[in-house]
Image (cartoon, rainbow, N blue to C red):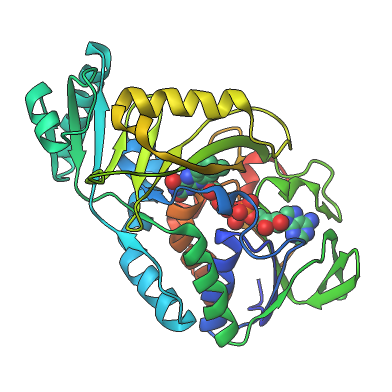
């Protein structure tokens, strides 16, 4: 592919914003288009947890991708924050994964073995030790696994920082424009929107779970990304905060510096329905109170909902289209769009601006789903 210089990025969620920033800071002229304000898709609901060894519990392409992206995170946050002039809360205080059944404890032991084979610092805890590590756990906790490398980031602030940073490098943000179609014309790319068209010489489709709704000339079967709803609670904590991100099989808890706590998250096949529900809120409240009984005393700030972009194999879709020259995909990040944002931006910018095709792109290639 000839190196493009005028690039249109469709979608201003964490993925599109990370890509726009990376392309702009490497010298490309970038237009970032969204039908909503920045970060109002799945990204606004994200808990911002960065936990490769929980999201992928065995050797897999997802584990390789998420570990590599986590390694980029310190620099990614520092650069976005400095370039964008926006403070981004970010902590690498680890995770505590709690077992409440013998089967869960066996799974944690197996995972501890995997981590030790990879030389990843992790501590397996028995009933007494897990309570010493987190005194607020309920009686159901029989053990745990602490993984120090994990962390969390404020996804909304990070997205705002990335956009501000991209704009400082000359990117243009175009909001309230719905993209309907991508066409190739005389070597250029034309983007038809509900309010006129835009022309560039390359395009990145980063429209989250809505990516399949953008028509593309010559493609009859769109990229198979579907919405998976996630609800999440926002609580005002009272008393001593939790020490780190705390997981159980039913929920996870993220303690913020401002004294609030996020409780995530439901996983629901509910189509494009972006509503919170009584069932979702109740399930999360029950799970949080079982894990940490003090949650009963928390204030209720609200519930959030977002549609995760999921693919049939739970891996993202990143890389060049086979059907249309100069079309790149950056979608389908499912449960890990925040965690995978730095690596996605790096892989795409390397491919688009430096003709460097990273071997990792083969696992996430659009062509695994046909002639996309
Ligand atoms: C409850 C919940 C908790 C989560 N927790 C975590 C977590 O702890 N860690 C983690 O890494 N990930 C987490 N995720 C997943 C993460 O939020 C997503 O993977 C990520 O936000 C996807 O980002 P995106 O930019 O691809 O999509 P989105 O954020 O959905 O952005 C897509 C954008 O494209 C725009 N768009 C769509 N169609 C068009 C169109 N035709 N024209 C113009 N614009 C368009 C939308 O308006 C939207 O702004 C969570 C998700 C949920 C729902």
**Where in the figure is residue 58, as x and y percent of width and height?**
32, 32
Quadrant for residue 309, please give it: top right
Q: Relative to the observer, which residue lies in front, 284 or 294?
A: 294
Q: Is residue 170 above or below residue 306?
A: below
Report if residue 335 is visible in the image: no
Q: Quadrant of the N terminus?
A: bottom right
Q: Residue 223 versus residue 146: which sits nearer the camera?
A: 146
Residue 227 screen position, x and y as percent: 66, 38
Q: Residue furthest top?
A: 102
Q: Quadrant of residue 203?
A: bottom right
User: Taking 286 as reference, is 194 left or right?
Assistant: right
Q: Nearer the viewer, residue 189 or 124?
A: 124
**Residue 211: percent from the left, percent from the top?**
72, 50
For the point 52% across and 80% down, the residue is: 165
Q: Is residue 64 visible?
A: yes
**Residue at position x 26%, y 56% in the image:** 92
Position of residue 207 relative to residue 145, above or below, is: below
Identify the residue at image location x=13%, y=37%.
133
Tell whether 362 sits left or right of 74.
Answer: right
Front one among 356 and 33: 33
For this view, does 275 lie left or right of residue 353?
A: right
Residue 362, placed above or below residue 303: below
Q: x, y percentage for residue 268?
A: 60, 28
Tally of marks: 0
């Amino acid at each position: 592919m000839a190196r493009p210089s005028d690039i249109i990025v469709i979608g201003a969620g964490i993925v599109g914003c990370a890509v726009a920033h990376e392309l702009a800071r490497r010298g490309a002229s970038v237009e970032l288009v969204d039908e909503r304000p920045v970060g109002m898709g799945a990204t606004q609901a994200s808990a911002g947890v960065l936990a490769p060894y929980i999201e992928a519990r065995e050797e897999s392409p997802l584990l390789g991708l998420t570990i590599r992206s986590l390694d980029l995170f310190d620099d990614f946050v520092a650069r976005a924050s400095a370039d964008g002039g926006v403070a981004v809360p970010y902590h690498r205080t680890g995770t505590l994964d709690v077992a409440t059944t013998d089967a869960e404890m066996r799974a944690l032991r197996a995972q501890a073995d995997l981590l030790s084979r990879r030389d990843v610092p992790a501590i397996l805890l028995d009933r007494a030790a897990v309570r010493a590590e987190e005194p607020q756990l309920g009686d159901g906790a029989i053990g745990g696994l602490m993984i120090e490398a994990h962390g969390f980031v404020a996804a909304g602030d990070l997205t705002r920082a990335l956009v501000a940073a991209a704009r400082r490098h000359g990117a243009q943000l175009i909001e309230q424009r719905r993209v309907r179609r991508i066409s190739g014309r005389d070597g250029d790319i034309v983007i038809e929107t509900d309010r006129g068209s835009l022309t560039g010489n390359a395009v990145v489709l980063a429209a989250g779970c809505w990516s399949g709704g953008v028509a593309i000339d010559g493609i009859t079967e769109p990229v198979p990304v579907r919405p998976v709803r996630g609800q999440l609670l926002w609580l005002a904590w009272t008393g001593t905060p939790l020490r780190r991100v705390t997981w159980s099989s039913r929920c996870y808890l993220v303690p913020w510096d401002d004294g609030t706590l996020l409780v995530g998250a439901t996983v629901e096949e509910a189509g494009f329905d972006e509503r919170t529900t009584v069932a979702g809120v109740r399930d999360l409240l029950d799970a949080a109170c079982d894990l940490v009984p003090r949650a009963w005393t928390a204030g209720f700030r609200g519930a959030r909902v977002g549609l995760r972009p999921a693919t049939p194999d739970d891996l993202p879709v990143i890389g060049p289209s086979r059907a249309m020259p100069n079309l790149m995909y950056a979608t389908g990040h499912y449960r890990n769009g925040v965690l995978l944002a730095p690596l996605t931006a790096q892989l795409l910018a390397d491919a688009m601006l430096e003709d460097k095709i990273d071997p990792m792109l083969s696992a996430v290639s659009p062509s695994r789903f046909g002639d996309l």
